[in-house]
Image: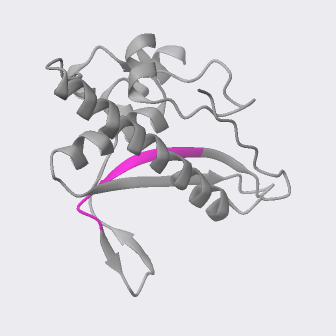
Amino acid sequence: MRIVVNIDRRIRNPRAIALMAREFLRGVVASNRLYIRMAKAKGRPLPRVYESDVEWRREPWAGKFEEFEDCLTALRRGWADCDGLAAWRVAELLEDGDNAQLKIKWKVHPKTGEVRLFHALVRRNPRWDPVRKRFTGPTEDPSRRLGMGRQRRRAA
C-alpha cells in the first residue's frame, strides 16, 4: 500500500515542515518495528541497518518529491536516503529497549529564506531541555556512516 501526503506550498516555516516530517517518519518507525518483530517471530530476523548491505544514496527524484521508505524497501533496493536509514535505526534501537527518537534538521538559504535541505538523524537518550524548549542528547547519523560523505566527495 502506498500513502501519499501533500504539504501545502504556502507552508514555508521550516520548523512546521520538520514537525510534520517527523510525525510522518514516526509512522515509518512503527512500520519498521512491526517488520522487525514479524521477521524475528518467523525465525529470520532482519539484518540491522549497519550490518546490512544497504548504503546511503540520494533519491533519484530528489527535489521533486520525498519518499519515506521503510526498511523492507531499503533492503530490496540496496539503498535509502537519510530519512529511511534514520527511521530504520530508531526502530531497531526501540526494539532493543533503548531510548531513541528522530531528529530533523534543516538549512535555510541566507538570502532567499527558502529551506534548502532537510536531514534526518537519530537522537539517542533524548532529554527535554525546558530552557531551550527542545530535546537534547547525542545524535547518530546513519547516512554518514553508510556512505553520504564518501559519495558527495566522489561526485565533486
> Where does residue 107 sit, x and y in percent of width and height?
60, 52
> Where does residue 11 sit, x and y in percent of width and height?
79, 59
- Left or right of 69: which side holds 122? left
Q: Nearer the viewer, residue 72 or 122?
A: 72
Residue in view at x 75 percent, y 49 percent: 7
Q: Nearer the viewer, residue 106 or 18?
A: 18
Residue in view at x 63 percent, y 18 percent: 60
Work out which quarter of the rendered image holds the N terminus and state it.
top right
Residue in view at x 76 percent, y 53 percent: 114
Residue in view at x 29 percent, y 13 percent: 53
Work out which quarter of the rendered image holds the C terminus and state it.
top right
Q: Nearer the viewer, residue 85 or 109?
A: 85
Q: Would you identify the image quadrant in which residue 29 lies?
A: top left
Residue 114, visible in the rendered structure: yes
Q: Magenta residues, as a range? A: 118-126
Q: Is residue 22 above or below residue 131?
A: above
Q: Is residue 131 above or below residue 3?
A: below
Q: Would you identify the image quadrant in which residue 20 lies?
A: bottom right
Question: Which residue is at the far bottom?
Answer: 131
Residue 56, visible in the rendered structure: no
Q: Which secondary structure type mostly characterizes the magenta part of the structure?
A: strand
Question: Which residue is at the far front?
Answer: 42
> Where does residue 79 sit, x and y in percent of width and height?
43, 18
Q: Is 122 included in the stretch rendered in magenta?
A: yes
- Left or right of 55: which side holds 59? right
Q: How is the image coloured?
A: one colour
Q: Is 132 included in the stretch rendered in magenta?
A: no
Q: Nearer the viewer, residue 26 or 81?
A: 26
